[in-house]
Image: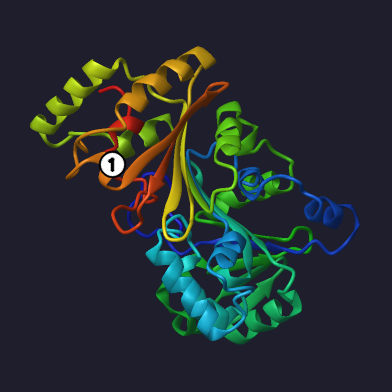
Amino acid sequence: MLRSLGVRAVLAPVVVIAVALAAGGWVADRVAADPRPPLASALDALPTGTVVAGFTDWSAIRAGLGLGDASTARARAALSDDASLRDLTTRSVLGASIDEMHSLYGWSAADVEWESYGQAAGGAALVARLTGSVSFDDVQKRLRSIGYARSGETWVLGDEGRRTVGQGLAAALGTLAVLPDEQLVVAVSEEAYAPTVLATVRHERASLLSRRPVAELATALAGSDTALLQARQEGCRSTAVGDSDPDVAAQAAAAVARAGRLAAPVFSGRGLVDGSPRQDIRFVAAFDSPAEAAEQLRVRRALAFGPFIGQSGRIEDSLDLVGATSSGGTATLRFDLDPDRGAYMAGEGPLLFASCPR
């Protein structure tokens, strides 16, 4: 479900969803001809003030799992179960309700090309690009049958409809707007945040991708089935080692002293590419200069071996370093991952090689 930055509990169920289809003309041409990787397109739809962004490439996940267009109940169930087991839906808002959404709304994550989710001080936003298989005439008919009432451009779910769809979907999809301008779904946690998000989607405001560190991360993480990007404070908090254990903190400090000085990234990210049976995961950090990125690559590479400080065992038990590169202001560590031994897309848990100075 959608959450504003720093809020762990469920927000009030005021969610605005803008669903747009490229119906023709220059908009349709622009959407269809977008040559960028899905991650770049997804980040370009989030407001520039976003400090945490998640991404799920549903088309790639369906293809990787051999599910085609996931048009059958069995395929949708496999998409929900198998993708979750392989840590591919952790960054998704839609992934937990595939069956329910298909039955009620006529579309679900099985009909989405890519999904992005961003948190900012002003609110949280979901943006998803739908496949061409969705009939939006049917979408609007279903909204009426569920219990939505139309007022101008918006569709508001009434009390009876809330009982029909249940608390989870009512909180996420309480207020909808169907706009035939883009092939996108946009949801926000606060109604007042909707104009900012919609202006970004329409390229009337600067997007998250317009920020140099984020654009570099998007390049380094292109091709990911799922990705997480975090601004400095959020990335540092999520990877911190030994905050509640002085002994662990001392071990981390000793390891850093041997490797060299850690610097805090301007933005950091991680991206997972599913394989069979193993996976590829990249940890990328954007710094203020190429020189700092090169130095931090050296330091962080040295911290990517040995005891998993803050966790059990050794790093190599689940993460096998297979590449370390720097380009421009970014440093990238690429690992071969055993999905049965570790899951990292939640973005929570001590990771010294991706952390910040204490």
Residue 330 image offset from top left, x and y in percent: 51, 26
Pick the quarter of the image with the N terminus. Answer: bottom left
The kind of residue tagged 1 is Glu
Q: Residue furthest left?
A: 247
Q: Residue at x 44, y 45 (%)?
A: 281
Residue to which mark 1 is pinned: 316
Is 302 left, or right, of 88 in this rendering? Answer: left
Is 209 left, or right, of 242 in this rendering? Answer: right
Q: Residue at x 24, y 21 (%)?
A: 256
Q: How many marks?
A: 1
Residue 170 image offset from top left, x and y in percent: 48, 72
- Residue 9 placement: quadrant: bottom left
User: Can residue 318 be seen by looking at this rendering?
Assistant: yes
Residue 135 image offset from top left, x and y in percent: 74, 77
Q: Residue at x 47, y 18 (%)?
A: 294
Q: Residue at x 65, y 32 (%)?
A: 210
Is 317 left, or right, of 25 in this rendering? Answer: left
Q: How packed is label 1: few (under 14 Cα within 10 Å), some, or many (20 or more)?
A: some
Q: Residue furthest right?
A: 25
Pick the quarter of the image with the C terminus. Answer: top left
User: Element type at marker 1?
Assistant: helix
User: Can residue 332 be seen by looking at this rendering?
Assistant: no
Residue 278 image offset from top left, x and y in percent: 41, 55
- Toward the viewer: 189 or 93? 93
Is 345 drawn above or below residue 325 in the view shown? below
